[in-house]
Image: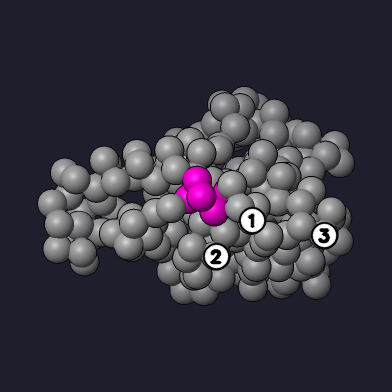
Amino acid sequence: MNVWGWAMTVGRPVQNAGELISVLVVEDDAPTRWRISDALVQAGGFGVSDVANLADARQAIGAAIPDVLLTDLQLPDGSGMELIRDLRLRSDKTEIMVISILGDEKSVISAILLGANGYLLKDAFPTDIADTVRDLVRGHSPISASIARFIVRRTQGQTGQASASDLNTAKLTHREIDILWGIAKGFSYADIAERLGISKHTVPGYIKNIYRKLEVNTRGEAVFEAIQQGLIKL
């Protein structure tokens, strides 16, 4: 963990955080955490701190309330939901955005009700995270397209109700459903193959078929659609 005036991802100090937008990045996957933090530092105008777990995140917000929190939900020592709740008890001014592979109804609604202002799926990550964070600070609510569609359906009273054509499209085999469940849990191709007793080289082919049947392009969208259609439960 580091203080606001330093960016761990690049190992160099940034300018005084007093005039910067302070951002706390909470993400246990190191490459993802570094990518987000480095993009913000390179863009300028941000004082970035990044941590890999809930305990360090709590310590960070205890020392200084950030202007922006970017957090994953699945952390090695707890849930990002707990962090959102903790931060909201301390501040109603911090902008909070979830960045997660989870796009199911429970995760999305829970995060929003706890106080998240935006929700992005990792597989639908913006090309310019700095602009996205600036939009968040300006009062916008960045939301991945599939999440936005879900919210629209929920508002229209159609949440979780797949049409007959949707169900016909999603005629997944038992093996494909097993693989989709593994994707939802964040397992690697090798992990999925080992658990199912198949070659890891066949997993991409299964995933390609899953995408085609669900009419999606990313893992996050596939998981979201499968949960909406009742094909898997987390």
* Residue 162: mark: 1
Whole-number angstrom distance, CA of label 2 to CA of label 1: 9 Å
Circle nearer the N terminus (3, 1): 3
Residue 95 appearing in the image = no
- How far from the left and from the top, in percent, is residue 11? 44, 39
Report the front residue among 48 and 154: 154
What residue is drawn where x is 26% and y is 41%? 205
Circle nearer the N terminus (2, 1): 1
Report the front residue among 119 and 136: 119
| SS class, disc 1 | loop
- How far from the left and from the top, in percent, is residue 124? 55, 38
Q: What residue does disc 3 label?
A: 157
- How far from the left and from the top, in percent, is residue 26? 55, 56
Residue 155 appearing in the image = yes
Q: What residue does disc 2 label?
A: 230
- How far from the left and from the top, in percent, is residue 171? 43, 53
Apparent side of residue 172 relative to residue 99 in the rendered image (left or right): left
| SS class, disc 3 | loop
